Image (cartoon, helix red, strand yellow):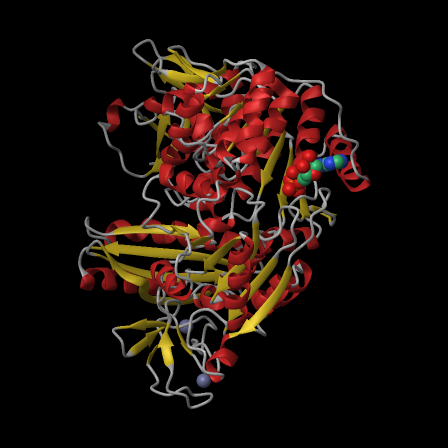
Amino acid sequence: MQYADVIVDIVHEKLDRCFQYKVPEGLQGKLRAGSCVMIPFGSGNRLIKGYCVGLGEECKFDPAKLKDIAGIVEQDAGDEGRSIALAAWIKENYGSTMIQALKTVLPMQKSVKKLEHRIIERKAGREELISMLGECQRKHQVAKVRLLESLLEEESVPYEWVTGRLNVSAQAIHSLEQAGALRILSTSSYRDPVKVKASDEEKKHLSDGQESIVRTILEELNAGESKTYLIHGITGSGKTEVYVRLAEGVVSRGRQAIVLIPEIALTYQTLLRFYKCFGNRVSVMNSTLSPGEKYDQFQRAKTGEIDVIIGPRSALFTPFPKLGLIIMDEEHEASYKSEGTPKYHARETARELARLSGASLVLGSATPSVEAYYRAKQGEYGLFQLKERLTGGTLPEVEIVDLREELRSGNRSIFSRKLQELLADRLSKGQQSMLFLNRRGYAGFVSCRSCGLVMKCPHCDVALSEHGGDRLVCHYCGYVAPKPSVCPECGSKYVLGFKAGTEQIEQKLKELFPGVRTLRMDRDTTGTKDSYERILSAFANQEADVLIGTQMIVKGHDFPNVTLVGVLAADLSLGVNDYRAGERTFQLLTQAVGRAGRGEKPGYAVIQTYQPEHYAVVAAAAQDYESFYQEEILYRELGGYPPVHHLLAVQVFSPEEKAGEKLATALAERARKLISDRKTLLLGPSPASIGKVNDVYRYVLYLKSPDYQKLIEIKDQLEACLTQLQNTRENVQFDFDPMNFL
Ligand code: ADP
Ligand code: ZN
Ligand code: ZN
């Protein structure tokens, strides 16, 4: 006998109330999680609609009292049906329960509290504001300039927006209030996050490249196609303008658009362009909104009050009645993959949502993910290239410095001679510099300082990690080797793990240039979101000569006075025990190099590395995506890594080392038996690269296959046998095509 769990009410907080029904013989095999069913309900056995969220053999109630499911309803195309279908797809493809998937897809319903909102309103007249603006510009008070400029444009702006997106400190606001430029008002009712009126300002004349993208996509959408497109265009090539025009085209046809932008990249300028076009028909979602406010946004979308929503990953689930377009800017960003359960990727999920809605999906990036570019090359996605910067400004000149060479000529400093020379020059000219420490790889990969050789696993071609000072371990397959005392390549005894932090760099810099004003940005100095903004805004205000930081500093704001970027140890991220190391390195370096020379003055970038010949380093220095991709895809093909093949990570967490290892081994044994073809491979189990976190031991095994469906089947079967193998204290998670490695 088969039993089905059915929910009758599709609202977030009622999802946990399931009713169990019997599956009559005629329906067995046809019913799946996600199916819409008719069921007899209540004492009168009134027939109502419900959704099946799970199937099982086990009866949780008195079998005599259970009723039969009356029938399956063909999925209706309405909102509800679409959400259920999307949740079913997520459940299937990422391995979660139907309830977890539904909770992801459905908006959280919370009572909407009337929150206190503050807004900043223009108080002084235009003339007066313009003269204040002039004064602030003279004094280089860049934050105040930004606020005054926006007040000249808009009568009022929300307080949080000014402190958050606009990066203006409370102090600066207060001082402008004192000066009579503005007043701060409180409102107790919910307001639009931003109040800007749509303006019919003169439309930019699109470049030929932009024009053809907009035309092609809208024509194909009109013809009823639901396709995916990738726009590969360098920063400043006009992608955002294309997004705005596409959204406009879709909205004018009576449909709606979702615009996904990683939170960190969501700038004031970008938002303003959407507001200029859509006025109060656009809404913004970000992490500072409360669940109530988010729910409110979703309601407004549902009832047709807005046409466009802009936000991070979760904005994807905005319930628009006639979705026509999904845009995903900075498509390569790791934040598009959810780290919670279900571990869905927004790109693939957007693809499915677009299919269900008959919408177009447009991906954009200056450094596309290898996945997206591969699909585009395979012809699955339409590919567009935008190669010119529309704003002028030149690409920085880039020099690669060979750190082995520096060592040979007796320079043991973390700064190469070239970098020292350029830093001195910038300091003397009053220009700013950024020093970027590529800190991914902190996990402790080991390399030779004389020849640059990285110790790698002979089976996996990924870097080995140092354990306990004397062993090297592969976290894919479990291979272990003693740490060599001399380099196998050149015999040097400088075989070391690399460990330099931003603090150390700051200290060395101060020794080298006494009196230099520095700001430091890393996980230690940015405990709160506020401090992140504060550091950036202090740097923008030119309160420091040098900003030192980890990957955090390569994104977000433009600093026109920065004319030098130094990348210290570019290859650190190449050492990470992760097949995406090359891709991440290329993206980080390309972004870092692009930080120099955004203003009028030309920029210069220095990339210090032990592997000057590595393709990711060379291609990033040349800002040449295509040549990077050609090398990278070859490596993925040879190694059987995504996107050519797929990877399923099975992660075991346990408070007891032995028990965790035992479970991981048992799962690996099962998995081995489940593999029925030659193309599917099992790797591991092995301890995770960080083997223990908060006293929880972590093990991982990987399954690799060209066929995603095979991995889903294996996952389903492993999951099915978990109840027998697992103690209650262990936790097992599945991650398809993982972005982060344990
Ligand atoms: P991206 O999103 O690729 O970084 P943007 O769309 O932000 O590029 O465009 C970069 C700059 O060029 C912006 O200042 C924008 O206003 C301007 N711009 C975009 N399209 C055009 C155009 N067709 N004509 C003139 N300027 C443009
Ligand atoms: Zn060596
Ligand atoms: Zn290995």
Q: Identify the residue shown where x is 79% and y is 32%.
A: 205
The C terminus: image quadrant: bottom left
Q: Is residue 182 left or right of residue 229?
A: left
Q: Identify the residue shown where x is 57% and y is 47%.
A: 561
- What is the x, y in percent for residue 479? 36, 75
* Figure check: 100 above or below 553: above
Where's ligand 2: which quadrant? Answer: bottom left
- What is the x, y in percent for residue 456? 44, 76
The N terminus: image quadrant: top left
Q: Identify the residue shown where x is 25% and y is 73%.
A: 468
- What is the x, y in percent for residue 470? 27, 79
In the rendered image, which quarter is residue 499 located in?
bottom left
Task: In this rendered view, identify the residue nearer to me: 110 or 59.
Answer: 110
Residue 186 visible? The answer is yes
Task: In this rendered view, identify the residue nearer to me: 397 or 369.
Answer: 397
- What is the x, y in percent for residue 588? 52, 56
Q: Is residue 487 left or right of residue 621?
A: left
In the rendered image, which quarter is residue 275 located in?
top right
* Figure check: 455 above or below 172: below
Residue 706 visible? The answer is no
Task: In this rendered view, identify the residue nearer to me: 711 or 415.
Answer: 415
